[in-house]
Amino acid sequence: MAGFVSHYTNRLDAKGRVSVPAPFRQALVRDGFEGLYCFPSPHHPAIDAGGNQLVAQIEKRLLGVATLTEDHDALSTAFYGASETLKIDGDGRVMLSEEQRHYACLDNQVTFVGQGYKFQIWEPERFKAHRADAMKRAMDVLAQQSAKAAGAA
């Protein structure tokens, strides 16, 4: 399967290095991206990360907003100005910056969460709470879609 799937928890060392899960590194290689593109999630206390597919989604989103506007500038700053491109070392590790660790409240461990075209980096306990909320929201969305489909039939 292509893309980022499943979740993994790895130890963050004292220097801020963490091993990117092998399946995620393989997805980045298939994607053709050198390194790892990261920025603070605009929705959660987590880091959004990925490669060319993620950058393509950002560019697609920005195309829908008129340039030279405050909205475009805000989105550009959030997606590009606050981003970092991390190098993956020979051991499959990246060094998360102090700013990234602070934003996502990362300390000893991090959880990598696949989302298809991207993944997120979470503090493990915060992810557990988020996962419970996400599952409830997903069930609500699916129920709404089923109700619309039944009404259209």
Image (cartoon, rainbow, N blue to C red):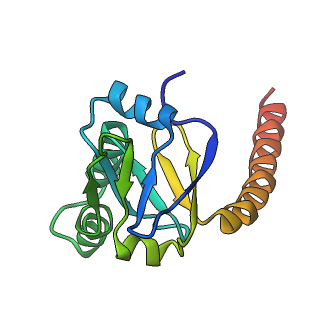
Q: Residue at x 24, y 39 (%)?
A: 34
Residue 77 pos. (x, y %): 26, 70
Instruction: Judge whether 133 appears above or below 10 on screen.
Output: below
Q: Please state, as top left, top right, bottom left or bottom right, where the C terminus lies in the image.
A: top right
Q: Which residue is drawn at 47% across and 64% down?
A: 13
Give the quadrant of residue 57. Answer: top left
Residue 56 pos. (x, y %): 31, 41
Give the quadrant of residue 31. Answer: top left
Give the quadrant of residue 54. Answer: top left
Q: Would residue 25 appear left or right of 52 to someone viewing this image?
A: right
Q: How many labels does the image show?
A: 0
Q: Would residue 24 appear left or right of 135 to someone viewing this image?
A: left
Q: Would residue 120 appear left or right of 7 to someone viewing this image?
A: left
Q: Nearer the viewer, residue 109 or 84?
A: 109
Q: Would residue 24 appear left or right of 39 to someone viewing this image?
A: right
Furthest residue toward left: 68
Q: Which of 37 and 108 is in front in this view?
A: 108
Instruction: Judge whether 19 appears above or below 44 on screen.
Output: above
Residue 11 pos. (x, y %): 55, 58
Residue 150 pos. (x, y %): 84, 32
Q: Residue at x 51, y 71 (%)?
A: 104
Furthest residue toward top: 1
Q: Please state, as top left, top right, bottom left or bottom right, where the N terminus lies in the image.
A: top right
Q: Residue at x 31, y 52 (%)?
A: 64
